[in-house]
Amino acid sequence: MHHKPPQRFEPTSLLTSLAGHSWRLLTLRGDWRAMPDSPAFVALVLGVMVLGGLSEQLMRGHSPALALISTLLWLGVVLAVSSHRGQPNRRLLAALALLSIGIEALLILATWLPAAEWPVAIWSGLAVLRLLLQADGTGAEASR
Protein backbone atom coordinates (compact mmCIF):
# COMPACT_ATOMS: atom_id res chain seq x y z
CA MET A 1 0.00 0.00 0.00
CA HIS A 2 1.45 3.33 -1.07
CA HIS A 3 0.83 6.48 0.92
CA LYS A 4 1.17 9.90 -0.54
CA PRO A 5 3.52 12.07 1.44
CA PRO A 6 1.80 15.06 3.05
CA GLN A 7 1.63 18.06 0.80
CA ARG A 8 4.24 20.67 1.72
CA PHE A 9 3.22 24.21 2.42
CA GLU A 10 5.05 26.42 0.00
CA PRO A 11 4.71 30.13 0.79
CA THR A 12 5.99 31.18 -2.64
CA SER A 13 3.24 29.32 -4.48
CA LEU A 14 0.64 30.79 -2.11
CA LEU A 15 1.96 34.31 -2.66
CA THR A 16 2.10 33.79 -6.42
CA SER A 17 -1.47 32.53 -6.45
CA LEU A 18 -2.70 35.45 -4.31
CA ALA A 19 -0.90 37.96 -6.52
CA GLY A 20 -2.40 36.35 -9.63
CA HIS A 21 -5.94 36.49 -8.22
CA SER A 22 -5.42 40.09 -7.12
CA TRP A 23 -4.14 41.05 -10.57
CA ARG A 24 -7.13 39.42 -12.28
CA LEU A 25 -9.50 41.30 -9.98
CA LEU A 26 -7.65 44.57 -10.63
CA THR A 27 -7.76 44.03 -14.39
CA LEU A 28 -11.51 43.31 -14.28
CA ARG A 29 -11.05 39.66 -15.23
CA GLY A 30 -11.41 38.06 -11.80
CA ASP A 31 -14.42 36.27 -10.41
CA TRP A 32 -15.32 36.27 -6.73
CA ARG A 33 -16.67 32.72 -7.07
CA ALA A 34 -13.10 31.51 -7.76
CA MET A 35 -12.12 32.30 -4.17
CA PRO A 36 -11.92 29.46 -1.67
CA ASP A 37 -14.84 29.19 0.77
CA SER A 38 -12.51 28.91 3.72
CA PRO A 39 -12.59 30.81 7.02
CA ALA A 40 -8.80 30.47 7.29
CA PHE A 41 -8.29 32.00 3.84
CA VAL A 42 -10.65 34.87 4.68
CA ALA A 43 -8.78 35.50 7.94
CA LEU A 44 -5.46 35.50 6.07
CA VAL A 45 -6.49 37.97 3.37
CA LEU A 46 -8.35 40.21 5.84
CA GLY A 47 -5.24 40.32 8.03
CA VAL A 48 -3.06 41.24 5.07
CA MET A 49 -5.66 43.82 3.96
CA VAL A 50 -5.58 45.50 7.38
CA LEU A 51 -1.77 45.55 7.42
CA GLY A 52 -1.76 46.90 3.86
CA GLY A 53 -4.26 49.60 4.76
CA LEU A 54 -2.21 50.68 7.75
CA SER A 55 0.96 50.69 5.64
CA GLU A 56 -0.66 52.72 2.87
CA GLN A 57 -1.98 55.33 5.29
CA LEU A 58 1.33 55.59 7.14
CA MET A 59 3.21 55.95 3.83
CA ARG A 60 1.03 58.98 3.14
CA GLY A 61 2.20 60.55 6.38
CA HIS A 62 -1.00 60.11 8.36
CA SER A 63 -0.80 59.62 12.11
CA PRO A 64 -1.04 56.05 13.41
CA ALA A 65 -4.44 56.84 14.97
CA LEU A 66 -5.85 58.20 11.71
CA ALA A 67 -4.34 55.26 9.79
CA LEU A 68 -6.03 52.82 12.15
CA ILE A 69 -9.39 54.61 11.96
CA SER A 70 -9.46 54.73 8.16
CA THR A 71 -8.31 51.11 7.87
CA LEU A 72 -10.98 49.91 10.30
CA LEU A 73 -13.62 51.94 8.46
CA TRP A 74 -12.65 50.24 5.18
CA LEU A 75 -12.73 46.86 6.95
CA GLY A 76 -16.27 47.67 8.09
CA VAL A 77 -17.33 48.58 4.55
CA VAL A 78 -15.88 45.35 3.16
CA LEU A 79 -17.63 43.29 5.86
CA ALA A 80 -20.94 45.12 5.32
CA VAL A 81 -21.10 44.81 1.53
CA SER A 82 -20.09 41.15 1.56
CA SER A 83 -22.83 40.11 3.99
CA HIS A 84 -26.37 39.08 3.24
CA ARG A 85 -28.89 38.97 6.10
CA GLY A 86 -26.05 39.13 8.61
CA GLN A 87 -24.13 36.21 7.13
CA PRO A 88 -20.86 36.97 5.37
CA ASN A 89 -20.27 35.43 1.98
CA ARG A 90 -16.71 34.19 2.48
CA ARG A 91 -15.91 34.06 -1.23
CA LEU A 92 -17.04 37.64 -1.86
CA LEU A 93 -15.35 38.79 1.35
CA ALA A 94 -12.07 37.15 0.26
CA ALA A 95 -12.32 38.67 -3.22
CA LEU A 96 -12.95 42.17 -1.84
CA ALA A 97 -10.07 41.80 0.62
CA LEU A 98 -7.74 40.52 -2.09
CA LEU A 99 -8.77 43.35 -4.42
CA SER A 100 -8.18 45.81 -1.57
CA ILE A 101 -4.66 44.43 -1.09
CA GLY A 102 -3.88 45.09 -4.75
CA ILE A 103 -5.36 48.59 -4.51
CA GLU A 104 -3.31 49.31 -1.40
CA ALA A 105 -0.14 48.16 -3.16
CA LEU A 106 -0.89 50.43 -6.12
CA LEU A 107 -1.63 53.38 -3.83
CA ILE A 108 1.66 52.81 -1.99
CA LEU A 109 3.47 52.86 -5.34
CA ALA A 110 1.54 56.02 -6.28
CA THR A 111 3.07 57.87 -3.31
CA TRP A 112 6.27 58.09 -5.38
CA LEU A 113 4.42 59.18 -8.49
CA PRO A 114 1.71 61.62 -7.36
CA ALA A 115 0.24 61.98 -10.87
CA ALA A 116 -0.73 58.29 -10.74
CA GLU A 117 -2.85 58.60 -7.60
CA TRP A 118 -6.07 59.77 -9.28
CA PRO A 119 -5.98 57.20 -12.12
CA VAL A 120 -5.26 54.46 -9.56
CA ALA A 121 -8.14 55.63 -7.36
CA ILE A 122 -10.58 55.83 -10.28
CA TRP A 123 -9.56 52.44 -11.69
CA SER A 124 -9.76 50.91 -8.21
CA GLY A 125 -13.27 52.25 -7.77
CA LEU A 126 -14.28 50.69 -11.08
CA ALA A 127 -12.77 47.35 -10.06
CA VAL A 128 -14.64 47.35 -6.73
CA LEU A 129 -17.86 48.39 -8.46
CA ARG A 130 -17.48 45.62 -11.06
CA LEU A 131 -16.93 43.04 -8.34
CA LEU A 132 -20.02 44.19 -6.43
CA LEU A 133 -22.12 44.25 -9.61
CA GLN A 134 -20.90 40.74 -10.43
CA ALA A 135 -22.19 39.58 -7.02
CA ASP A 136 -25.49 41.47 -7.36
CA GLY A 137 -28.49 39.20 -7.54
CA THR A 138 -26.62 36.14 -6.29
CA GLY A 139 -27.52 36.56 -2.63
CA ALA A 140 -23.94 37.62 -1.96
CA GLU A 141 -24.68 41.32 -1.79
CA ALA A 142 -25.77 43.10 1.35
CA SER A 143 -29.49 43.58 1.76
CA ARG A 144 -30.58 46.97 0.58
Image (spheres, rainbow, N blue to C red):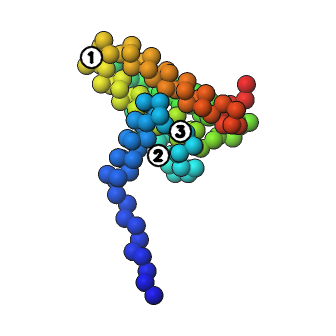
| In-front residue for pair 26/39 | 26
Q: How many marks?
A: 3
Crowding near the residue tagged with mark 1, few <14, some 14–19, many ≥20 C-alpha atoms within 10 Å: few
| In-front residue for pair 79/8 | 8
Instruction: Quickly name the residue at label 2.
Output: 44
In-image side of 3 versus 76 (left or right): left
At a point 47% along the width and 42% down the height, the residue shown is 45
Give whichever of discs 1 and 2 has the lower sequence position. 2
Question: How far apart in space, not on screen, are marks 3 and 1 (Cα)?
Answer: 30 Å
Instruction: Quickly name the residue at label 1.
Output: 113
In-image side of 135 versus 49 (left or right): right
Query: In the rendered image, which quarter is residue 48 located in?
Result: top left
SS class, disc 3: loop
Q: Are marks 3 and 1 in contact (CB under 8 Å)?
A: no
Give whichever of discs 3 and 1 has the lower sequence position. 3
Which of the two marks, 1 or 2, is nearer to us in this view?
Answer: 1
Query: If the image is split into quadrants, where does the N terminus sit?
Result: bottom left
Which of the two marks, 3 or 1, is nearer to us in this view?
Answer: 3
